[in-house]
Image (cartoon, rainbow, N blue to C red):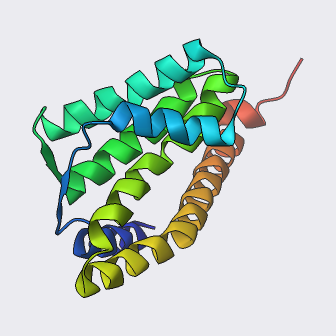
Amino acid sequence: MQALKDAFNHEYESTVGQYSFSVPKDLTDMVEARIKAAQPNVGDTTLDKVSRAVAAEMERFSDGLPTIDGNNLLNAKNSVSGLYKQMRGPERSALNHAVGVFDDIIESELSPTVQGQADLARYQNLSEPYQTYKDVGKAVGKAQVEVEAESSPLASSPRA
């Protein structure tokens, strides 16, 4: 699994990782527009909470600068995805839609050049295999926990 993870990291680094991206001044508006397009009836509280969370992660990984390197942009995206566990109900759904803003930024900045278009295509083609890799990793982790539980001395002790 580690070799596969290393291969994904290398691909991400050789596509998006080698670029520097502008941090959109209207990031919050972009996030809100993305969420509203997918969830027209989203509440203002949910919209505000999720858009502020995305903006906070972008601020964190860009160090408040107007640009962010590609690796940190991907780190911000992954960090925002990690917030899913902390959110509930409609916030989770809104967050799923909001995460796409990172791909929007990547696409808008890589599209104008031929090399950028090639790297963008490579990056976009990693999405589905990477999701499968993460799902397999979760399954392997769950199986390891089950095997460890079964091989535990407590698991084989007779019950009264």
**Rendering quarter of residue 135:** bottom right
Q: Position of residue 137 (x, y in %)?
A: 55, 58
Give the residue at x 55% y 34%: 95
Q: Is residue 86 above or below residue 72?
A: above
Give the residue at x 59% y 52%: 138
Q: Is residue 143 above or below residue 157?
A: below
Give the residue at x 52% y 38%: 33
Q: Position of residue 4 (x, y in %)?
A: 42, 73
**Rendering quarter of residue 28:** top left
Q: Residue furthest right?
A: 160
Query: Is 146 left, or right, of 75 in this rendering?
Result: right
Front residue of 110/18: it is 110
Number of disc labels: 0
Query: Is 137 left, or right, of 75 in this rendering?
Result: right
Front residue of 37/144: it is 37
Front residue of 31/72: it is 31
Give the residue at x 58% y 36%: 35
Q: Look at the image and tell me in which quarter the C terminus lies.
A: top right
Query: Is 64 left, or right, of 34 in this rendering?
Result: left
Q: Position of residue 26 (x, y in %)?
A: 32, 36
Q: Position of residue 139 (x, y in %)?
A: 65, 55
